[in-house]
Amino acid sequence: MKIRVPYETVKQTVRQVMLNLGLTEEQAELCAETHAQSSLDGVESHGLNRVPRFADYVRKGWVDIHARPELVGAKGAVENYDGHLGIGILNARFCMDRAIRLAGRHGIGCAALRNTTHWMRGGTYAWQAAERGFIGICWTNTESCMPMWGSRVPGVGNNPFCMAIPREKGPIVLDMAMSQYAYGKLGVYRLAGKELPFPGGYDKNGHLTANPGAIEESGRALPAGYWKGSGMAIALDLAAAVMANGRTGADMDREGRGSCTGCCQIFIAYDPYLFGGREEIQAKLSSRVAAADATEPDRPGGRVTCPGERTAAARARNRKEGVPVDETVWRQVLKLAAEK
């Protein structure tokens, strides 16, 4: 069952969990803000829902809360970091900040990160760039969690990809896994006892299904766009591993720790006004969004939106009405916050 909890209550509760796990005040604040913001934006699958899993991984020693990203190489507008299996959120925020700073000097900047851990909601870091006036692009590789096209067994990660374009009326933000549904989203539907709106993978008998639990059991998520999503996932995996000089998804499979442990991530920032004036660029964006708004919807009362617009609407609504959280997950987080 879903309940609504004030944003600050969610944030402070998660902050206490992080402090209980041994994070510093600064670390706990940044992690709590990121988890709470994701749920505020309607992305509970990678917000509050991930807190118990993060706590489990810290206790298993899969996440080193004392590690910090280390610069291991730099050339021009590109830097390479080793995350030393530190806190994924903090490593990612740091690297996107570095990419932004490099872009401020060079027009474009890239921070390639290896040996890190799950960044939770990838869109967080694209938003981070857009809110500072830069186009943000980032992606991660993962262990295998969906079949390559033509295969019956998981053989490639769903390797989320994100892009944000700053706009005066709110950024355009794409945040997508290369599977039809991220595994976190499958969990949201399963907890709610709902079927997926569209088939999202295969059950253990190889039948296409909209049952989220059956897909989680089989590990056979459907690639977005079928063979196209499969191909894109392979390309993103290889590019991340090469650019960061780190693990491929197959390497992570062999280590067997799961949930992106030891993954590679790429963070790119670009100055949108490098070759055009602010007024000109913003006019292009406004014109394109207006064209989308004017598109005829496929059902009465519907509206065609650009990526990120529904997120912004959810953020405003949930600030007013409270953050929607799964009651079972909320009880788990409250229990973690009460532990000493």
Image (cartoon, rainbow, N blue to C red):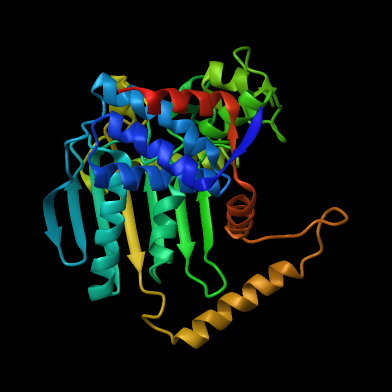
Q: Residue at x 27, y 73 (%)?
A: 104
Q: Residue at x 71, y 27 (%)?
A: 195
Residue lying furthest top in this view?
205
Looking at this view, is 215 or 23 the one in front?
23
Q: Quadrant of residue 179?
A: top right
Q: For the C terminus, which image quadrant?
A: top left
Q: Residue 178: percent from the left, percent from the top?
A: 51, 41
Residue lying furthest left in this view?
72
Q: Quadrant of residue 134?
A: bottom left
Q: Residue 245: percent from the left, percent from the top?
A: 20, 43
Q: Residue at x 63, y 31 (%)?
A: 200
Looking at this view, is 159 or 5 the one in front?
5
Q: For the N terminus, which image quadrant?
A: top right
Q: Is residue 7 visible?
A: yes
| Relative vertical location of residue 280 with respect to residue 193 in this rendering, above or below | below
| Relative vertical location of residue 36 with respect to residue 185 in this rendering, above or below | below
Q: Residue 48: percent from the left, percent from the top?
A: 48, 36
Residue 305 located left or right of residue 28: right
Residue 197 located left or right of residue 10: right
